[in-house]
Image (cartoon, rainbow, N blue to C red):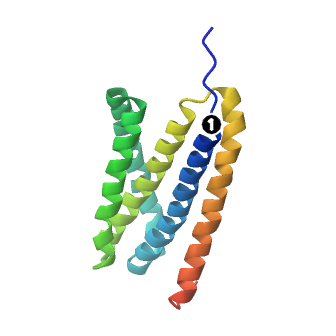
Amino acid sequence: MSAPAAPIQARDVARLAAIGFLLSWGEILSASYRYSLFLGHNEPEAIPMALAFGSFATAVASMACLMAFRTFGPAGWAARTMLVLAGVAAATIPVGWSPSPLTTFVAFVSLHVVMITGMATVWGYIHGPLDPRQARAVIPRINFGVALGGIAGVATVAIATHALGLAW
């Protein structure tokens, strides 16, 4: 029989909820950006193909994450994964300066992979040290932060859309 896991401190739960907030807020902003950029330069019928490419690329990224996890351990894996994902996201910024159908397709797929893999990495890292009892107690509080982040993301998009005079 293994020893019970150390109790999770309230400040740790608050930090995890803040990470969940930022992740959810970022996902709403990222989705708004990638869909509007993509649809501004591609036909709507191209979305299923972009999502298929994104799913395939996410599967490849998941395999790379598994190899990194085995090589670097939980903390090293999460840190390295998030740094790589931040680099990929940053590499898509110039696409908005000179968009074309091909570059917006690549940016859409890249940001899809970043968000899905980023969320999986964060949730995997959060769940790792929790025993089932702790998970039942902590995850709902973290999800509250995620929900607030989603609301804030939608509000940010709505305010920015209105402020820039863009149509819905």
Q: Position of residue 129 (x, y in %)?
A: 55, 29
Q: Position of residue 22 (x, y in %)?
A: 53, 58
Mark 1: few/some/many CA within 10 Å (<14, 14-19, 20+): few
The answer to whether residue 167 is seen in the rendering is no
Location of residue 161 with respect to 33 vertically, above or below: below
What residue type is disc 1 on?
A: Gln
Residue drawn at (28%, 72%) of the image:
94
In depth, the one of 131 and 112 nearer the eye is 131
Q: Is residue 29 above or below residue 123?
A: below
Image quarter (top left, top right, bottom left or bottom right) of the C terminus: bottom right
**Residue 152: image location, x then y, percent:** 61, 68
**Can the viewer see residue 33?**
yes
Q: In terms of image quadrants, where is residue 76? A: top left
- Quadrant in which residue 138 is drawn: top right
Quadrant for residue 39, please give it.
bottom left
Q: Residue at x 42, y 32 (%)?
A: 74
- Please indicate whether residue 19 sits to the left or right of residue 100 in the image: right
Q: Quadrant of the N terminus?
A: top right
The residue under label 1 is 9
> Across the whole image, how many numbered discs are drawn on residues?
1
> Which residue in the rendered view is the most extreme toward the bottom?
165
Q: Kindly identify the residue that appears in the image at 61 percent across and 71 percent down.
A: 154
Farthest-out residue, top: 1
Q: Looking at the picture, how far across and down is residue 118, in whole percent?
A: 45, 49
Kindly state the secondary structure of the residue where label 1 is placed. Answer: loop
